[in-house]
Amino acid sequence: MLVNYYRPPGDGFRALRNLAAEYDAIGTDRVATIIIGDFNLHHRKWLRFSNRNSPEGTYMHQFCQGQGLLQHVSQ
């Protein structure tokens, strides 16, 4: 599964919840998942220059951990 994602700044959790719901709706009939895009969120484990974890960043980090998704791009 390949996902190209854009979350507008100030969108809150709407787009993140939609992404999670669509991911779950597809089920497990896939070999691999790649999600790329502009998430407009902050989490110190993902962005070394982030000075905080935004609520949206925490939500997305927990979602990825729960699904076994890993970040492979660091720059």
Image (cartoon, rainbow, N blue to C red):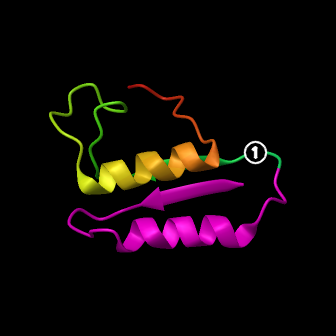
Judge whether residue 33 is colored magenta: no
Residue at 53% x, 47% y: name it: 64
Indicate the position of residue 18 as horizontal and vertical percent values.
49, 73
Label 1: which residue?
A: 32
Q: Quadrant of the N terminus?
A: bottom right
Relative to 63, 10 lies left or right = left
Relative to 13, 62 lies left or right = right
Residue at 27% x, 25% y: name it: 48
Badge 1 element: loop
Q: Is residue 17 above or below residue 62?
A: below
Identify which residue, 75 or 29, lies in the foreground. 29
Q: Name the kind of residue labelled 1 in the image.
A: Ala
Judge whether residue 22 is colored magenta: yes
Residue at 52% x, 66% y: name it: 19
Q: From where the camera sits, is residue 53 visible?
A: yes
Q: Quadrant of the C terminus?
A: top left
What's the magenta region?
1-30
Indicate the position of residue 52 as horizontal and vertical percent values.
18, 39
Q: Residue furthest left?
A: 51
Indicate the position of residue 29 as horizontal and vertical percent values.
84, 60
Indicate the position of residue 28 as horizontal and vertical percent values.
80, 59
Relative to 66, 10 lies left or right = left
Q: From where the camera sits, is residue 39 visible?
A: no
Circle 1 residues within 10 Å: few <14, some 14–19, many ≥20: few
